[in-house]
């Protein structure tokens, strides 16, 4: 790894640490609180944006060796964008929830450390090579969540208007159930609702098994390569 | 894939999208709301039924090449039936819960996309070839759920008449616990009830492991075939 | 399988079905309700006991070919005992909880179907051959549950005397948490309690992984043998 | 295994049993209650400390064969320290929560049995050889927990000041959710909070899959070596 890449990672670490220092001092947004954090963040975001621009230019067809398609299809490019996009979105978004998400995404700059980890590269490459399986699982998840959302909305909605009464509420319940988290903030109480819920739970064990199998293969690949 | 098969899949997608449009407009059942959705659904269901009839005829002994048993034992046939059965059941069923389930099952038409996915075929074939293992797991699940249902009904029923007081309530609790969802809408509070619950939880980890192993094998098979 | 073994399995099925018929008629114990169920159960239990006695005698050193140690170390013997023990215990036990457990255990007679399943034999043999691993996992579980029980009793007990206030309550919480069921009937609220809880949760993911690995190996073995 | 090692393990077992006897007699701390338990613990802790000191000296460069680096990098050394450290910390720590944790850690002396288990050695060695993968998973967990903590604090904090209102509360929620325990003591109720929660849940299934894969490899290694 070259020295400038190390510098960027140190910068990323610095900006995340500063973010938590700011939070622990009670700063609810960048404009209130000490000016230092605001300018520190602006400086870091500018440098990271410059780095991203340079990398884009370096891998683009403007250079002698032609476009480096590998970079533009890699997770690295995504992480480079994720590291700076929130900063620029912060100038456009005005509603407080959006700003909160955008601010929190600063933590995701740590994903830039991906560049420094050979194991992460092997795992990610294996995941990408299994994209057909991931697409299949996603399709099954989508169908199950849609079915769960629609059917629980119809079956449990009348009995629990404040929770299952909206489509989104039923979808939220479906995800909480299918990941086996099961908060219990909402649970079906009618007989047909519970029957459908049981079918969904059994399907979800299969889906989780599929996901574990995919991630497992990726880590197996990493194990073979590293040893 | 031939053009008419693509047409059917586009039709399926259209009917599911229309269903969600209808729902977002607040249509609680097909008869209220704009007439368009009712007739759109009737048209789609008729075409899908016709397609199923043609496929049945094509694979039946009436044709020159004899019965195609492979089709009649395949998941494809099941998905073909699932895609149209709810529509016809809607004329017979009159209680609102049944109608809600039947209406929600329109989403399951998306399972027809199975036909277009080679990965799904490999995974499904592997699952079918493991049917003996699946039968074994089902048997263990059945015994555990029955035991859980009966024993919790007896042990916790007196203390919680409104939840564990019915056999179905105890079975519902058993499934929620064994999938490790654990809503907390009901949980044992007596010492013997908690002892039995611990035994059931430990058994359920083993059962989940078995299911993950089966699904894992199926996805492993898909990985070997696709690469 | 010989005809008398099939007969025993049919008898087992009959007795479990009768049990559920009796329950659905509202019989809370064998002495109230119609006399038929009481005598039916007595007859079945007697025949199953006789069968067990005959099998014990057949595999014992009294016969010409010497003791069949394989039988006396097999799960079959355990299931043979489990099928009749509750009936005889019913004459000794008098407290209602004990009787409820004993009565519910009639369902476990279905485990006798193990004898008829080659896949179950392979899975069980593989599990037995992994007994050292199972012992290791049990040891880790025991240490974790004991540590969880003692520490949560001390840390959360003062804040929640009605739930974490007893050692058993804390152990119950530990098992509910470590199987990731998480009812939420009790959860730590103090900072040190939550820190210890996080350690226990992370340990439990490892333990579940170990259990899944063991069961997975057993099912893999079954897959290789059956195919 | 030599006789003195067996003696140490018997001593460990004795001290843990005594601890539970003391607890069942209602002793809330070592100074109240019968003096016997206090002196028994002091004796055991002194012997274990002496043993640790001897082992340190034996493996140190003072002996003829030079430093035994293997011991000083082994889990055994960690378990030797864990067995006695709490006793000595008990003289320094004065706040009741700290003392409770320190007292509870006596149970962890059972980890000394690691020395007697060949299977545990193989599993642990395999886990150590996978340290790069474990580091990768830890990094992903850290990023996800930090992101979850910060974003839920911002998104759900205003709506639930008593639960999501502190950073630690949000981190606690993140761990409870990511291990799929899901107590339901706190759950997001705003739309953006639920969206972020769904992303975190899906990530957590992947993380659990990675952990299961790592532990699975370790147990597979043990299976190959033991058989």
Image (spheres, coloured by chain):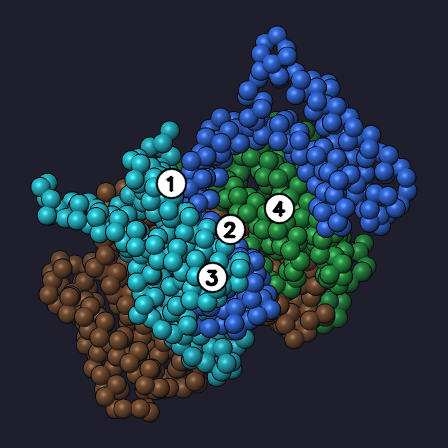
Chain colours: A cyan, B brown, C green, D blue
Front label number (2 vs 3): 3
Subunit ID for the residue under disc 3 = A
Residue lying at the far top of the rendered structure: D64
Mark 4 belongs to chain: C
Residue A166: image x %, image y %? Answer: 42, 79
Instruction: Return the chain for callout 2.
Output: B
Q: What residue appears at the point 74 percent right and 27 percent down from the top-left corner?
A: D48
Mark pair 3, 1: CA separation:
44 Å
Which residue is labeled 2 in the image?
B207
Left-right relation of D56 to A15 = right
- Disc 2 to disc 1, C-alpha distance: 24 Å
The mark lying in front, picked from 2 and 1, is 1
The label on residue A34 is 3
Mark 2 vs mark 3, CA separation in Å: 56 Å
Residue at mark 4: C79
Q: Which mark is residue D99?
A: none
In the image, taking residue A217 as reference, residue D30 lies left or right, namely right
Task: Please tell me the numbered disc located at residue A219.
Answer: 1
Residue in the foreground of this view, choosing between B183 and A103: A103
């Amino acid at each position: 790894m070259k020295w400038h890449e190390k510098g960027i990672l140190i910068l990323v670490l610095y900006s995340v640490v500063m973010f938590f220092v700011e939070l622990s001092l009670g700063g609810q947004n960048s404009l209130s609180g000490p000016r230092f954090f605001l300018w520190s963040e602006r400086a870091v975001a500018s440098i990271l944006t410059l780095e991203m621009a340079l990398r884009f230019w370096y891998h683009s067809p403007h250079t002698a060796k032609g476009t480096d398609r590998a970079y533009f299809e890699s997770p690295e490019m995504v992480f480079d964008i994720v590291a700076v996009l929130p900063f620029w979105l912060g100038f456009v978004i005005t509603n407080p929830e959006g700003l909160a998400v955008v601010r929190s995404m600063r933590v995701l700059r740590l994903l830039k450390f991906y560049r420094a980890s050979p194991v992460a590269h092997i795992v990610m490459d294996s995941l990408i090579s299994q994209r057909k399986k991931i697409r299949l699982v996603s399709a099954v998840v989508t169908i199950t969540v849609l079915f769960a959302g629609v059917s629980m909305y119809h079956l449990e909605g009348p009995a629990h208007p404040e929770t299952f009464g909206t489509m989104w509420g039923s979808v939220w319940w479906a995800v909480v159930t299918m990941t086996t988290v099961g908060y219990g903030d909402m649970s079906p109480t009618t007989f047909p609702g519970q029957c459908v819920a049981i079918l969904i739970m059994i399907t979800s064990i299969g889906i989780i098994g599929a996901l574990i199998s995919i991630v497992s293969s990726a880590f197996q690949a990493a194990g073979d390569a590293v040893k």
